[in-house]
Amino acid sequence: MFRTLAICLVGLLYFTQAPVLRAQARDPRVDKLTMDTEDLKRTVADQDKRIAELEKTVKMLQSAATPPPPEPIPAPTPPWKAPSSWKLIQAGMSEAQVVGILGPPTSVQSVEDSRTLFYQPDAQSTSTLNGTVTLKDDRVTASSPPAF
């Protein structure tokens, strides 16, 4: 009987302590997963550093490769300010032909059947160039080019 009691006591002791003993023993799979997780965290941190360095390099290269802004395009010189344009004006030309060569006049004066086309600089200009073309019945009768 003592023997049976001892076996029961040992059995009881084993079954009550077994879960505690098993809980204290570490599962190697958990240890492996923990190590893998730490490795992944290090890898991600390294990749973040590399990406930041690459982005910095790309920005630096882009700023170095950006061309300077283009110079503003100067306003075109009106054709009437070119001496060669005035040499093309001939007696008998129509007003449309004159405007095609010299461009639109800055002002026009009409008196009966005569029209005078004035070519003058605007008020902001320091130029003193003035030219006129006189037409009668839509044909050039006289022209006075600017003094270049």
Image (cartoon, rainbow, N blue to C red):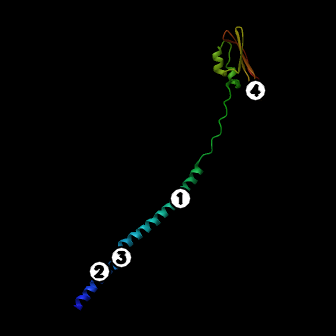
Badge 2 marks a residue whose secondary structure is helix
Quarter of the image containing the C terminus?
Answer: top right
Using the image as rendered, state which of residue 94 and residue 16 is in the foreground: 16
Q: Secondary structure at mark 1?
A: helix
Marks 3 and 1: CB-CB under 8 Å? Answer: no
- Name the mark on residue 112: none
Residue 52's tag is 1
Give the foreground label among 1 and 2: 2
Q: Which residue is mark 3?
A: 23
Residue located beneath label 4 in the image: 123
Seen from the viewer's position, the closer of residues 48 and 56 is 48
Q: Answer yes or no: do the residues labelled 4 and 3 have beta carbons within 8 Å?
A: no
Q: Earlier in the sequence, mark 3 or mark 1?
A: 3
Work out which quarter of the rendered image holds the N terminus and state it.
bottom left
Q: Earlier in the sequence, mark 4 or mark 3?
A: 3
Q: Position of residue 124 (x, y in %)?
A: 75, 29
Question: Image quarter for residue 94?
Answer: top right
Residue depth check, mark 4 versus mark 3: number of the one nearer the observer: 3
Instruction: Identify the residue at image location x=69%, y=23%.
Output: 80
83 with respect to 41 (left or right): right
**Res. 57 image quadrant:** bottom right
Amino acid type, mark 2: Phe
Element type at mark 4: loop
Residue type at mark 4 is Ala
Residue 54 position, x and y percent, is 52, 57
Q: Report, in whole angstroms, how far the alpha carbon at label 3 lies from the one at label 1.
A: 44 Å
